[in-house]
Amino acid sequence: MPADRIWIKNPLALFTANDTQAPGGLVVENGVIVEMLAAGASPAQPVSETFDAREHVVLPGLINTHHHFYQTLTRAWGPVVNEPLFNWLLTLYPVWARLTPQALQLASKVALAELLLSGCTTAADHHYLFPGGLEDAIDIQVEAVRELGMRAMLTRGSMNLSKENGGLPCKNVVQDAETILADSERLIDRYHERGDGAQIQIALAPCSPFSVTTDIMRACAEIAGARDVRLHTHLAETLDEQEFCAKRFGMRTVDYLQSVGWLGPRTWLAHGIHFNQVEIHRLGAAGVGICHCPSSNMRLASGICHTLELEDKGAIIGLGVDGSASNDASNMMLEARQALFIQRLRYGAEKITPQKVLGWATRGSARLLGRSDIGELAVGKQADLALFKLDELRFSGSHDPVAALLLCAADRADRVMVDGKWRVVDGQVEGLDVQGLIADHQQAARQLVNG
């Protein structure tokens, strides 16, 4: 009998992200889903473990497609609580310039643990800060991901356009092009895994139009094409950014994207708010992905993503929590709830259903990362699962279990499985001293903001 053949039996409800019905549950073997069972059915072969899921809503593991782990150190920081994006960044860059390897390690663990507890099994992080002494930032993140047992798309971000040269960031957080490109190649060679079940993948992610040169954008596109990795950046987040592009490049953001060789299916963008209808059509026709970050966009008053128009024209939509200093949480279930509500304001209740939004958080997000092995429950897919109970006061009186997750504000998974292994049990991360992590992280946060 296989040692790891597990039956997740008779769930209270099952959201598969693909309309498959399996009221009898599912069977996991060697980290892969091998059976989806009808009501009353039993596994075709003996199992070594049965988990009775009668009190659980079972989902594919949620997938976060845009984050900045390091920003957990500057959550709810007074000087920027009421600032829009550009002022927010200008105030925070000098603080972030003091980031140390130990602080990044703690920040990454906190972000990942918080995500995991919210039912998230795969996270994309956009790290673009490399002050002196932090040259191995992505390596530090790799270690944190492996320690938590999650999957990650770690993007090698970059900034090389300082304020002195017409950009936004201060000069002590930017790098030269040669350093950026050499490290990008190194990280792909060392860490990028391919194929089903990959744990660590690398993408290239120049930060934004106002922090990198066009040469870096073009060079990253060339490397990504040659090495078959994905491309990521912030785009069309604010009207200030549109004005910056018009002034510096003489074009709008989508024209800029095309001019540097990024307008294609390898690219996914964070935010994607301020596009006109012609640009939406162009993005959809090119198969570009858009990561909707509703909490951050509301917090900074940036705007609302045109998700349905983008999706209708062929763009892929996923969700992301964005940085934990503009959200200020790392909770994918709460992010999905926020997406449900803000998108209903734009499109109406009938078109934005809990199932649609959970689809963005799972299958849609997987597609943004170029993955077909995660984000849904089906035979042959990876056994990444999030299980939620509805036994708290907030759920009392609810009737539709899947809808209740969002409408009644579920925020913590009872169990989470990644690659067929339980990573959260009874609402606790296996093997993690959370209180010790909080104490160390709090101290690092105080040291960072106090200089």
Image: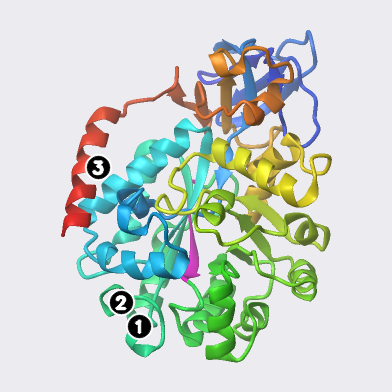
3 and 1 marks in contact (CB < 8 Å):
no
- Please state which amino acid type lies under the numbered disc 1: Lys
**10 Å crowding of disc 2: few (<14), some (14-19), many (20+):** many
- Label number found at residue 441: 3
Toward which corner of the image does residue 46 lie, by quadrant?
top right
What residue does disc 2 label?
170
What residue does disc 1 label?
163
> In front: 215, or 234?
234
| Horizontal arrangement in the rendering, residue 335 relative to residue 13 (left or right) | left
Magenta stretch: includes residue 202: yes
The relative height of residue 357 versus residue 84 in the rendered view (above or below) is above
The relative height of residue 168 versus residue 111 in the rendered view (above or below) is below
1 and 2 marks in contact (CB < 8 Å):
yes
User: Split into 4 quadrants, where in the image is the C terminus?
Assistant: bottom left
Q: Of callouts 3 and 1, which one flags the residue occurring earlier in the amino acid sequence?
A: 1
Q: Of callouts 3 and 2, which one flags the residue occurring earlier in the amino acid sequence?
A: 2
**10 Å crowding of disc 3: few (<14), some (14-19), many (20+):** many
Residue that protrudes farthest toward the front in the picture: 82
The residues bearing labels 1 and 2 have C-alpha atoms spaced at a distance of: 6 Å
Toward which corner of the image does residue 19 lie, by quadrant?
top right
**10 Å crowding of disc 1: few (<14), some (14-19), many (20+):** some
Q: Is residue 226 visible?
A: no
Q: Residue at x 79, y 60 (%)?
A: 309
> In front: 143, or 58?
58
The residues bearing labels 3 and 2 have C-alpha atoms spaced at a distance of: 25 Å
Span of residues in magenta: 199-207
Q: Residue at x 78, y 55 (%)?
A: 308
3 and 2 marks in contact (CB < 8 Å):
no
**x then y, percent, for residue 431:** 32, 26
Q: Residue at x 54, y 12 (%)?
A: 49
| Horizontal arrangement in the rendering, residue 329 relative to residue 344 (left or right) | left
